[in-house]
Image (cartoon, rainbow, N blue to C red):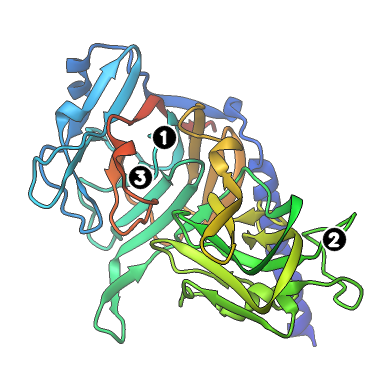
């Protein structure tokens, strides 16, 4: 009994300590930090090479469609632009972009950059740390992705352990990482009320969202004066939901096999389950009925509900775009469409992306506000700061189109702080 009580008390102390750390870091206070180094890019383009090195050639990463060149990294009017161009300068890479990495290295502290994304799907707008100088014996080669941003407003964080690899049953060599896609703008619930009801046997949702889409419930209602709250459990005994009709048939683009998911979870009348689509390519969900239904409204709840940490109670992986259509007997007709860029467009607005790193934790910030924290179990060596713009294959960042051409990742400044003693 004493041993159990001691364990319980110690667990409580750990929880309280963690809560205190998170509470202290929830709003960044730069008064507690000392600025050690910065680049404001307030100089002529040729001076970029005083602090930075640029790639000049093909990109080795198999998922990248762009070679990267010094000419694509341009300093102008106090801003560093990493330019995208539709041109082939390296075999099998029909795009060029830019990237840079710092000549000096950095250790624990707070790293912050103010930048805009390139304004097109398919682009990977990265601010990250990597030990380009190598690591000492016994240290891990780790990569810290402060933000691999995807248009219009997806934030991607990741911490990779590249030293300790393992082989999967299919023979693929892999490594530990913590890739997460954060949606800090937008709502999980979508309620589409039709001005004029329609009759149809088919409804579909289609999306080119760069990441998997997570659909908790897709609901279809007959015309009514009032519809249920999309984020509340549905009383199926008093409300007709055609998604649950006996003659309803569901098809989807497939399931992401790394999360517990089934197609049926999209229409199981439960908000604690979700259909998770595959990561790449077009995502879609289609409902059909044997007999036509008169439809007045369509609702769906999406995203990944956070159950712990600074994002407790918020949704991650919100859908970035969709169209909802009905079949009129001959062709598909548009009912509604959505573009998350209308809610928040990180290619139009400046934001700061930051990370506080020490031997115990990573704390990730946007505009000075904490949105995610994780334990540090691998990154203890000095790192190089990198900025890179890439065009990605397999629609990892969304579809690659000519809309990418001439867009750029724009960096206003990068700053490095150490905590005051």
Q: Residue 95: x percent and y percent?
A: 19, 41
- Label 1: element kind: loop
Displayed quadrant of residue 300: bottom right
* Residue 198 image position (x, y, % from top left): 71, 59
* Of the image marks 1 and 3, the number of the one nearer the N terminus: 1
Please give the name of the residue rendered at 47% of the width and 75% of the height, measured from the top-left corner.
254
Q: Return the residue at label 2.
A: 228
Q: Is residue 15 left or right of residue 258?
A: right
- Badge 2 or badge 3: first in the primary sequence: 3
Q: Nearer the viewer, mark 2 or mark 3?
A: 2
Q: Is residue 310 above or below residue 36?
A: below
| Mark drawn on residue 117 | 1
Q: In what element is the residue under mark 2?
A: loop
**Residues marked 1 and 3 touching at CB (< 8 Å):** no
Vertical side of 418 occupied by 296: above or below: below
Q: Is residue 198 above or below residue 262?
A: above
Q: Badge 3: few (under 14), some or many (20 or more) residues near its Cα, within 10 Å?
A: many
Tell me the residue that label 3 is attached to. Answer: 124
Q: Nearer the viewer, residue 243 or 293?
A: 293
């Amino acid at each position: 009994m004493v041993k159990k009580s001691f364990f319980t008390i110690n667990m409580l102390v750990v929880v309280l300590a963690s809560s205190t750390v998170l509470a202290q870091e929830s709003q960044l206070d730069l008064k507690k930090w000392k600025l050690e180094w910065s680049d404001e890019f307030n100089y002529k383009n040729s001076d970029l090479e005083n602090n930075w090195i640029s790639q000049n050639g093909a990109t080795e990463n198999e998922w990248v469609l762009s070679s990267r060149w010094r000419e694509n990294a341009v300093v102008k009017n106090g801003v560093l632009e990493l330019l995208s161009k539709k041109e082939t300068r390296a075999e099998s890479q029909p795009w060029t972009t830019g990237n840079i990495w710092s000549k000096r290295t950095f250790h624990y502290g707070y790293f912050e950059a103010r930048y805009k994304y390139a304004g097109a799907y398919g682009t990977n707008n990265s601010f990250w740390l990597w030990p380009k100088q190598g690591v000492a014996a016994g240290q891990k080669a780790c990569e810290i992705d402060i933000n691999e941003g995807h248009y219009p407003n997806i934030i991607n964080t990741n911490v990779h352990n590249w030293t300790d690899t393992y082989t999967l049953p299919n023979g693929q060599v892999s490594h530990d990482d913590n890739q997460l896609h954060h949606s800090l703008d937008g709502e999980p619930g979508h309620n589409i009320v039709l001005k004029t009801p329609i009759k149809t046997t088919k409804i579909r949702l289609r999306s080119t969202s760069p990441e998997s889409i997570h659909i908790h419930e897709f609901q279809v209602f007959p015309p009514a004066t009032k519809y249920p709250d999309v984020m509340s459990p549905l009383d199926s005994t008093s409300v007709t939901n055609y998604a649950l009709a006996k003659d309803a048939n569901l098809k989807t683009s497939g399931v992401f096999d790394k999360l517990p998911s089934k197609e049926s979870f999209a229409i199981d009348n439960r908000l604690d389950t979700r259909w998770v689509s595959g990561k790449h390519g077009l995502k879609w969900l289609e409902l059909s009925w044997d007999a036509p239904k008169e439809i007045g409204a369509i609702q769906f709840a999406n995203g990944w509900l956070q159950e712990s940490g600074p994002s407790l109670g918020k949704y991650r992986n919100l859908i970035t775009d969709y169209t909802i259509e009905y079949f009129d007997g001959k062709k598909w007709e548009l009912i509604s469409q959505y573009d998350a860029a209308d809610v928040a467009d990180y290619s139009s607005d400046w934001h700061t992306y930051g990370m506080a790193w020490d031997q115990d934790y990573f704390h990730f910030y946007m505009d000075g506000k904490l949105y995610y924290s994780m334990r540090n179990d691998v990154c203890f060596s000095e790192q190089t700061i990198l900025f890179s713009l890439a065009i990605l294959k397999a629609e990892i960042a969304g579809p690659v189109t000519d809309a990418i051409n001439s867009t750029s990742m724009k960096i206003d400044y990068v700053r490095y702080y150490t905590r005051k003693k």
